[in-house]
Amino acid sequence: MLRNFIRTAAAAAALATTALLAQAQAPAPIKIGFMAELSGPQGALGQDQYDAFMLVVERNGGRLGGVPVQVIREDSQLKPDVATQIVQKLIEKDNVSIITGITFSNVMMAVHKPITEKGVFLIGSNAGPAPIAGAQCSPFQFIVSWQNDNQAEVVGRYATDKGYKRVIGMAPNYQAGKDFVAGFKRMYKGEVIDEIYTPLNQPDFSAELAQVAAKNPDAIYVFYPGGLGVNFIRQYQQAGLLGKIPLLSSSTTDGSTLPAQQAAALGVISGTFWGPDFNNPANRQFVDEFEKKFNRIPSQYAAQSYDAAQLLDSAIAKVRGNMADKNAFRAALKAADFKSVRGNFRFNTNHFPIQDQHIFEVARDAKGRVSLKTIATPLKDHGDAYASLCKM
Amino acid sequence: MASGFTLTPRSVFAVLLLVGLGLVPLISGALAQPFYVTLFTRILVFALAALGLNLILGYGALVSFGHAMYMGIGAYAVGILAHHGVTNGWAQLGAAMVVGAAVALAVGLICLRTTREGGGMAFIMITLAFAQMMFFLAVSLRAYGGDDGLPISVRSDFGLFSLQDPNTLYYLSYALLLAVLLGMRRLIDARFGMVLRGCKSNERRMAALGFPTLRYKLAAYVISALVCVLAGMLLANLTRFVSPSYMAWTVSGELIVMIVLGGLGTLIGPVAGATALLLLEEVLSSLKFGLPWLDKLINQHWLGLIGLFIVFVVLVMKRGVYGGLPAGPPTAKGRPK
Amino acid sequence: MTTGLFLTQLLNGVQLGVLLFLLASGLTLVFGIMNFVNLTHGSLYMMGAYFAAAGYNAFDSSFLAAALVAIPGTMLLGFVVERLALATLYTRDHLDQVLATFGLILFFNEVVRAIWGPASVYMNVPQALSGTVSLFGLPYPAYRFAIITVGLLVGLALYLVIHRTRVGMLIRAGASNPQMVSALGVDIKGLNSLVFALGAGLAGLAGLMAGPIVSVQSGMGEPILILTLVVIVTGGIGSIRGAFYGALIVGIVDTIGRAFLPMLLREFLERSVAQAMGPAIASMLIYLLMAAVLALRPQGLFPVRHG
């Protein structure tokens, strides 16, 4: 009784005050939660995501779509339990209307429901695990990067084209790891003689590399993002396997890991949707500005996050900063009316991208730096295998 | 404090703390900040776990570095059963208690053997070993998420009430905390508690007096474990998530910190310690002085400051926040009894 | 599964064991002589790795520079920490020691994040050792072979110091009966500091050697610390011999388990399940071993003979 009275009186007072204040103010800044892996071996990925996102925000004077935004930066430390707490805090205490970032798939699996069931928009700029592309999809999700299998599928197609008969697949033992190997197998027509899944926290591959050397396959396909990729490539070279067994990969040699791998990675093949040498105006602007500001070559994670910021820029402009009408905002996001750095971009029915997938080789660029060189485009206008399972 | 209530700094503090905790949902509702209910439920959960550990650590001087594993058992009981569609709170409670008691009996029997020769080092290490085993067992359970953890879609349903509403969960945790406090009080004041404290000061004497010391210590160990199991169940309901990280040895370390910070060998100490530590963490991560370098240092590196604080507490504030308060009015000699 | 593969994995296990021995020897001496639970030992290992990486990157990728920065640097750090914070805790009970050193772990983890940033730091294997040697028909990284060699040499050196020098005699006496040594008029404070600094130096050496093969990051000390604690408890607190054999046992069990259990489990279980359970069960094996030793022979497998 008393409790209800106090509660109602306080609420009434609060309401009255806000109403008065609202009249006098311009559109309140839109609060965006940015959560990614910002520490440990994976820190480079999250940092690229953050830097590229803020590049767009700061270029527009702290605004997206003409509306001031407040970006709250959080580190999920690759711990799903920490991430769920952060998300709870962002939604309940900071009242964000958008959450973006989310580097790793296991974190994505933990926070996807807590975010979307509260009606907060999830603009994922990296992780794209299969369950949320399929049965667990939500109208509040928009993934601007890729579905995990895609980057593996293109390498599988390439391996078939190159005529490799016996391949070993290797990845860390979590959702994304399994997705990538599954994606490779979907397009690879040869024989996968073994699949090795290592613990996510294990940085030492000596035991597994000894097994690989013993089996002597035609090629090996790996997925080791971030710091794991640095360790893997270096240990692969130390074990004398580089140059002996062709190394095909996804997310293992990219802008975030090449600075540490350097010459140890020359010749490694990878598959993804974007490379720094793409020649469209949006990409040239992005790469030039990024290199000038941060003094390093942007990775694909930066490109993904840059596009996420551009997407939000276009959508917020379309609804003129009115975040209250969620259906209108969703439609604006779905339209994807922006110039992506990758060229073609549109959303599939499950709010994952439909785009081209390319093959790259690690080589020195015109300035002599170790970077990625585009060598083929095996998959054009490619969606994902799970869209039909999504009943949105 | 066996009979009557005396007005001392300690008792005033205790009352204020407990009453304050009871008022949190009201204040939070008035301020329209539901986040505080979440924060304080978490405090209640860890206060409860610390209370459990305090029975053997504070009163029995048995430094268990593995009590987080019992929190994990409670949390996983909720998670695994919910995963299979069993959301009945009573069923989850029953399963958690049975498994928890069985594990505690087995582990306790083995670990307590090492305390016979004195030298608590072995007990610390062996409890740590068992906790790590449990941790890796949970990691290996790929079917229940393994290292990635297991989301819990529906909170426990106890028939008369369900825990969907955050305030209900809060008040249940609060009620359990009060109940356990009361239970501990009676246990400590009874013969059981005296035997335990006797073992702490001189076990050989207790054994010579004819007490089956192992049985008493084992009983205390199992009771403390079950309280932690209860806390784990509440934690799973709060976060709607369970992962092996709930059983990390660092969590056990934090429980010990809470007890010592509050005041070793006192009853309210663990509650005070848990509140202080978790509030300190929360405040530090959002404190703003206006100086960018200082704010960045504090907001991003608060865990390091907590580390220094712990060292400070051990070196200087030996009796803890609550333990350092006078226990009674000054006697003729000028010092409280 | 060929003999060659098995022997290679065995060698990997020895390499891990040797690293653990470097850490365990210092830690066990501190436990045995000063009766001091030192959880900060893992942080000293981490600082060794960070100092090494800093030296390496500052002096144009020189491994020698890394070594010259890491080992004395860690010894100095250990000495300072001991004098400032830890010496007062020798007379306190184990709980206080555990808590204080636990707090220092948190502190050091944040210090490295503040100085070197949250992302990992990398250093490379020295040029001369970046190739492979051919062992049992399979290529084995030369650097890991070097780690084994260094570890065994250090083990030999420690043995000689402990058993053939006067200082070593004092250390053995201190491990066996600290009160008597102090009563005999030996500068026990100086001996304590010496032992602590020696342990810190060994931890720094381990960090230096591990730097090129693992990612140097905040918190890298904790997993190694736990393994080291298992080693010294299994081997026997205060015993260098126990540290040596215990480290080899733990290193080999962990590596062989990680390598072959998944293969074994794949006969019965689905592949990714087997590969999750394999390493986890291998890890559990170590703790089962330690629990069994503690329950049946609490003084360890190769205990110090107490006079």
Image (cartoon, coloured by chain):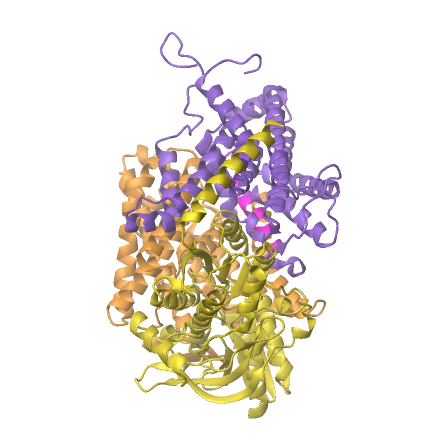
Chain colours: A yellow, B purple, C orange
Q: Residue at x 52, y 55 (%)?
A: A83
Viewer-closest of B136 and A67: A67
For residue B139, which quarter of the picture? bottom right
Does B129 lie within the magenta span?
Answer: yes
Does A239 lie within the magenta span?
Answer: no
Q: Residue at x 63, y 40 (%)?
A: B229
For residue A112, which quarter of the picture? bottom right
Q: Is residue C80 visible?
A: yes
Residue A290 locus on image (x, y percent): 34, 73
Q: Main secondary structure of the magenta part?
A: helix
Viewer-closest of C256 and C150: C256
Residue C271 locus on image (x, y percent): 66, 70
Q: Is residue A212 visible?
A: no
Viewer-closest of B88 and B108: B88
Residue A243 locus on image (x, y percent): 45, 86
Q: Quadrant of the C terminus of chain B?
A: top left
In the image, farthest residue toward the top: B332
Region rendered in magenta: B118-139
